Image: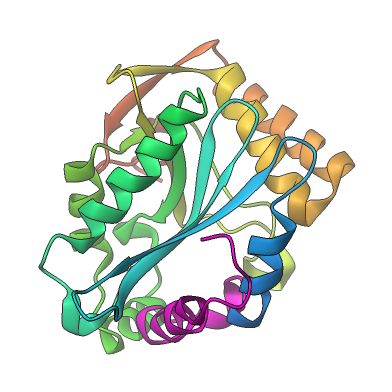
Amino acid sequence: MTGPDDPALAAFGRIQERSYYAPDTLIPPEAFGHLVSAGGQGGRRNRIVVAEGPAGQVLGGSIYHLLPEAAFSSFVAVAPEARGRGISRLIHTARMDDVRTHGLAGLFADSVFPERQDAEDREAEAQVGMNPLVRRRALNALGYRTVDVPYWQPVGGPNGGPLTDLDLLYAPLNGGNTVATALVAETMRAYWSGWLGKGRAGREAEALAERAGTGVLALLPATQTPGYWRGR
């Protein structure tokens, strides 16, 4: 989508509000128009893609970002009444085609690991018909893999600290079972720069690379968590 006045943006915003248990933590729908019209800067190209039914009704969509070396998915959702019809796969295929067209390596995302999610958030997800275990299985079926690295969002957790219930996932275009640490760190630096600023994003990306401790990282089934978290 390229037009800030496209009514599909508002329709997707309503799906986002209905589909996520904490919509206030996401990019707000009122910012979608600016996101699309601004496009991006510094090697970052913002994208919103929607899936529509035969009558033009919006069934789901995704916000993602084309970065210098790979892409990152901020959010994807399907309307509750349209789930189970392959809409997520259609959206994912469209995103991967875009990634391929721009010569990027693949698509990153992060996702809650069920065993690290607290009971309150798990119940809140259930209230909107979502289940983190089912979601991780679905992501695995789409081709995502867990990057075997200690990952957390720098902010968003208790008292404004790191959010540690997430794992970093990656859907490589080459279908490989490893990913270069440099690609992971550079992609996160580029992604985090949009909301942490360049300085903080650079420091967090360097810390992520240091925690990796190796130049090449294994890609695990998306139903698994990195080795760092096992037994903790």
Q: Which quarter of the picture shows residue 62? A: bottom left
Q: Going 37% across and 16% down the picture, which residue do you hit?
A: 178
Q: Quadrant of residue 101?
A: top left
Q: What residue occupies the far right of the structure in this picture?
A: 199
Q: Residue at x 41, y 46 (%)?
A: 232
In the image, residue 10 above or below residue 140: below
Q: Is residue 225 magenta?
A: no
Q: How is the image coloured?
A: rainbow
Q: Look at the image and give the residue range highlighted in magenta.
A: 1-28
Nearest the viewer among 66 and 112 is 66
The extreme top residue here reads 215
Q: Position of residue 135 (x, y in %)?
A: 25, 60
Q: Position of residue 115 (x, y in %)?
A: 31, 58
Q: Is residue 179 visible?
A: yes
Q: Is residue 3 left or right of residue 44?
A: left
Spot occupied by residue 106 in the image (x, y as percentages of width and height): 43, 30
Say above or below: 205 vs 11. above
In-image side of 56 versus 67 (left or right): left
Image: 76 above or below 191: below
**Image position, residue 95 (x, y; %):** 39, 45
Give the residue displayed 38% in from the left and 59% down from the top: 116
Residue in the image at 54% along x and 30% along y: 70
Indicate yes or no whether the magenta region holds residue 27: yes
Of 43 and 23, nearer the camera is 43
Q: Is residue 99 left or right of residue 138?
A: right
Left or right, 71 with respect to 55, comes to right
Say if residue 226 shows up in the picture.
no
Q: In the picture, residue 143 is in which quadrant?
A: top left
